[in-house]
Amino acid sequence: MKKLLVGLFTVCAVYSTQAQETEATATTEAVSPWTKTGNFTFLLNQSSFSNWQAGGDNNISGNLKVNYDFNYKEGDWNWDNKVMASYGLTKLQGQDQKKTDDRLEFNSLLGKQATGNWFYSAFLNFKTQMDRGIDKHGNYNSHFMSPAYLQVGPGLLWKKSDNLKVNIAPATSRFIFVHDHFTELGDAFGVEKGKSMKYQLGMSINGYYKFDVMENVSVENILNLYSNYLKKPENVVIDYQLNIVMKINKYLSTNFTFQTIYDDLAFKGFQIREMVGVGVNYNF
């Protein structure tokens, strides 16, 4: 929980700094090469039953989500950055609260225009979680930086706009980090027994496409693919996320999130996460 508070404090600090910079920029006539946009969403769900013959447990759940972009464009240089963080809890009557969502991700993509919509590029992707995870047996199976994934490498970027781009990096280094207490008895998250880090070299393809289906309905697609040259390159790591936001008004929206991950080093099969709810929505 301490790490969660630190994470939320960091997000608030970033927002405060951004607000101060915006005020300072407004006092000058110069146009900044930076564009900054953010979205904060709070979803709350509650169910209550009394003498309900079909059954059901009283429950309450909540989810916080922050999506922040800060992009730079000047001349033939582009630098796109995105921070995504989410955290959710649910509480069933008579049971301890459980974590339903926990994500911290940072993406950075630097490009120098080569010709037309093509850019020479370098990218960085970092993923982890902020709080401890508990499996169905009540054992801790993850926490901050365990596991954590880092990808970095040069490549080529095709960019039509900020809302449509594909980056191809044929020489991507991928690092998997985990605390050594998870590997005391065997392999964990693809990291060998007794170690705390695994290195991979392969190809990464990252795609991003966001569009409006109609007024006040936006669809965001994020796709990450990775193939490890060093071992079983045919076992491609897949991470796909779909975010749909249907705005009711300035502050309320219906949000749908679907994410699926395939990584046979972490789990033999598809991991699936799905969330839907009406929440408070604030753009900054």
Image (cartoon, rainbow, N blue to C red):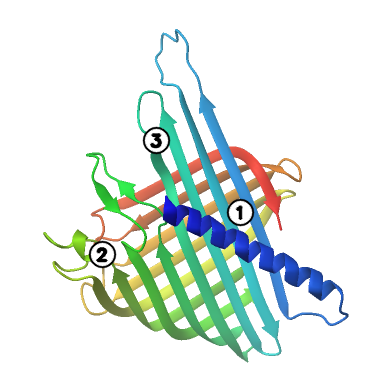
What residue is shown at x 26% (from left), y 79% (from top)? 229
Return the mark for residue 97: 3
Tell me which corner region of the image, top left, top right, bottom left or bottom right, holds residue 51.
top left
Q: Is residue 157 above or below residue 66?
A: below
Dot 3 and dot 1 residues touching (CB under 8 Å) = no
Q: What residue is disc 2 on?
A: 179
Q: State the residue in front, 79 or 156.
A: 79
Q: Badge 3 local density, few (<14 within 10 Å), some, or many (20+)?
A: some
Q: Position of residue 117 (x, y in %)?
A: 62, 83
Check disc 3 and report its element: helix, strand or loop: loop
Query: Residue placed farthest to the front in the image?
Result: 2
Quarter containing the C terminus: bottom right
Ranked by sequence position, the earlier of labels 1 and 2 is 2
C-alpha separation, residue under disc 1 versus residue under disc 2 = 36 Å
Q: Amino acid at mark 1?
A: Val
Q: Amino acid at mark 3?
A: Gln
Check disc 2 and report its element: helix, strand or loop: loop
Return the mark for residue 186: none
C-alpha separation, residue under disc 3 versus residue under disc 1 = 31 Å
Q: Badge 1 local density, few (<14 within 10 Å), some, or many (20+)?
A: some
Query: Residue placed farthest to the bottom in the image?
Result: 114
What residue is shown at x 36% (from left), y 68% (from top)? 149
In the rendered picture of this protein, how many numbered marks are placed on residues?
A: 3
Check disc 1 and report its element: helix, strand or loop: strand
Ranked by sequence position, the earlier of labels 2 and 3 is 3
Q: State the residue in front, 209 or 17.
A: 17
